[in-house]
Amino acid sequence: MSNAYLDALKKRRTQYSLGRNVSASKEELTTLIQDAVKHSPSSFNSQSSRAVILFGAESEKLWNLAIEEVRKVAPAEGFEKTEAKLKSFAAGVGTILFFEDQDVVRGLQEKFALYADNFPVWSEQAGGMAQLSVWTALANAGVGASLQHYNPLIDAAVAREWNVPAWWKLRAQMPFGSNEAGFGDKPFMDDAERFRVFG
């Protein structure tokens, strides 16, 4: 049985070798990212996921900020390798910053007290689905990406630089651009270890 969604999902791979040879315009990429987040599911249709999309020099600024923040806590010896990795993320077209709106979470906790403990968990799940949706949509458009987690180290610097509301919690960063390298084989564990089917 063929399935276009699964075909797109299989294209989603981590790409660290990013470039700027992307045929889609900034406007087309923005629409793609917005649509992918907008149509991702969320518990109680909370729509708690938020995104800040940085292109060009703004994306480079993010990774320069990350270098400075990581430098404060990383061992000095061998930092060149870490810095090179962070700079590689700036080599693409842009970066998406994924947030979860904590005001939405708190509002749902107050409105539905019986489920209060679950809303932070469900928010994280919604954020993960939004990230996967965007990543898959980019891959399907021939755009490479990876998912990074330099939060909470960079949270304060990001909030200051892009005037991010205090109630938006940074959860992930997704640098994206052209695929400047291929993908190796992806190993999978045996299905019998992951799945159980009954009935």
Image (spheres, helix red, strand yellow):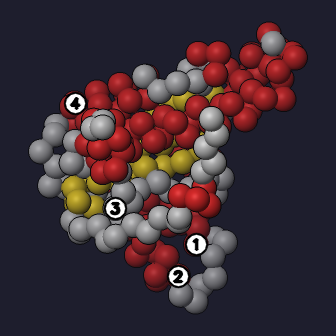
Q: What whole-number distance in Å separates the C-alpha atoms at marks 1 and 2?
A: 7 Å
Q: Nearer the viewer, residue 151 or 13?
A: 13
Q: Is residue 41 above or below residue 29?
A: above
Q: SS class of the residue under badge 2?
A: helix
Where does the image place residue 37, in percent across and percent down from the top left?
44, 29
N-terminal label among 3 and 4: 3
Q: Residues within 10 Å of mark 4 (few under 14, many from 20)?
A: few
Furthest-left residue in this view: 23
**Where residue 36 sits: x, y (%)?**
38, 30
Q: Which residue is mark 1?
A: 71
Q: Residue at x 68, y 30 (%)?
A: 122
Check disc 2 and report the residue beneath it: 79
In the figure, is residue 192 to the left or right of 53?
A: right
**Crowdedness near tag 1: few (<14), some (14–19) or many (≥20) residues, C-alpha within 10 Å:** some
Q: How far is disc 2 from disc 3 in space, using C-alphas?
A: 22 Å
Disc number placed over residue 103 in the picture, else none: none
Which one is in front, 18 or 5? Answer: 5
- The picture places residue 2, in percent across and down from the top left corner, at 27, 38
| Rendered image: mark on residue 15 | 3
Nearest to N terminus: mark 4 or mark 2: 4
Q: Nearer the viewer, residue 54 or 37?
A: 37
In the depicted structure, whether residue 15 falls above or below residue 158? below
Q: Residue at x 64, y 70 (%)?
A: 72
User: Could you give the CA–CA distance between mark 3 and mark 4, rounded to whole angstroms?
Assistant: 22 Å
* Depicted 38 relative to depicted 75: above or below: above
| Residue on which disc 4 sits | 27
Quadrant where the N terminus lies? top left
